């Protein structure tokens, strides 16, 4: 799982990226984690520049950490 963020951003070298790609073909858990990561990145990208209530931010962070 620790390589998925780097995989998604294209930061891995070619052999490592190929190993991750092969692993994703057989591991539904990692595919799900990657999908969740991509969704989270997309949501955060939309929130940039917008004011977020601190209480809501704290609840979102807590919910994210509980899901880990």
Image (spheres, helix red, strand yellow):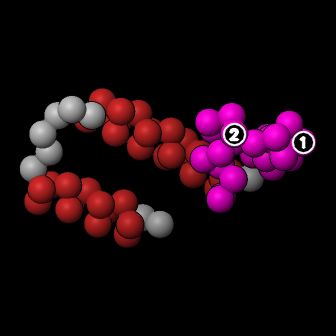
Q: Nearer the viewer, residue 28 or 22?
A: 22
Callout 2 environment at 10 Å: few (<14), some (14 to 19), or many (20+)? few
Callout 1 environment at 10 Å: few (<14), some (14 to 19), or many (20+)? few
**Residue 35 pos. (x, y %):** 54, 42
Q: Is residue 18 visible?
A: no
Q: Nearer the viewer, residue 13 or 18?
A: 13
Q: Nearer the viewer, residue 20 or 14?
A: 14
Name the quadrant containing residue 64. bottom left
Label 2 secondary element: loop
Query: Is 52 inside the magenta-drawn segment?
Result: no
Q: Is residue 6 visible?
A: yes
**Residue 6 pos. (x, y %):** 65, 45
Against 17, residue 27 (above or below) is: below
User: Does the magenta stretch mainly form a helix, a strand or a loop?
Assistant: helix
- Position of 18 with respect to 35 (left or right) is right
Identify the residue position indicated by label 1 in the image: 15
The N terminus lies in quadrant: bottom right
**Magenta highlight range:** 1-26
Please name the residue shown 49% across and 46% down the image.
Answer: 36
Please name the residue shown 65% across and 59% down the image.
Answer: 2
Please name the residue shown 84% across and 46% down the image.
Answer: 16
**Residue 33 pos. (x, y %):** 57, 51
Identify the residue position indicated by label 2 in the image: 11
Against 64, residue 10 (above or below) is: above
**Residue 57 pos. (x, y %):** 20, 55
Please name the residue shown 47% across and 66% down the image.
Answer: 68
């Amino acid at each position: 799982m620790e390589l998925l963020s780097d995989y998604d951003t294209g930061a891995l070298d070619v052999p490592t990226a190929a190993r991750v790609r092969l692993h994703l073909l057989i591991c539904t858990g990692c595919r799900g984690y990657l999908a969740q990561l991509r969704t989270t990145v997309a949501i955060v990208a939309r929130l940039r520049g917008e004011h977020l209530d601190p209480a809501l931010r704290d609840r979102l962070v807590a919910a994210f950490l509980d899901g880990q």
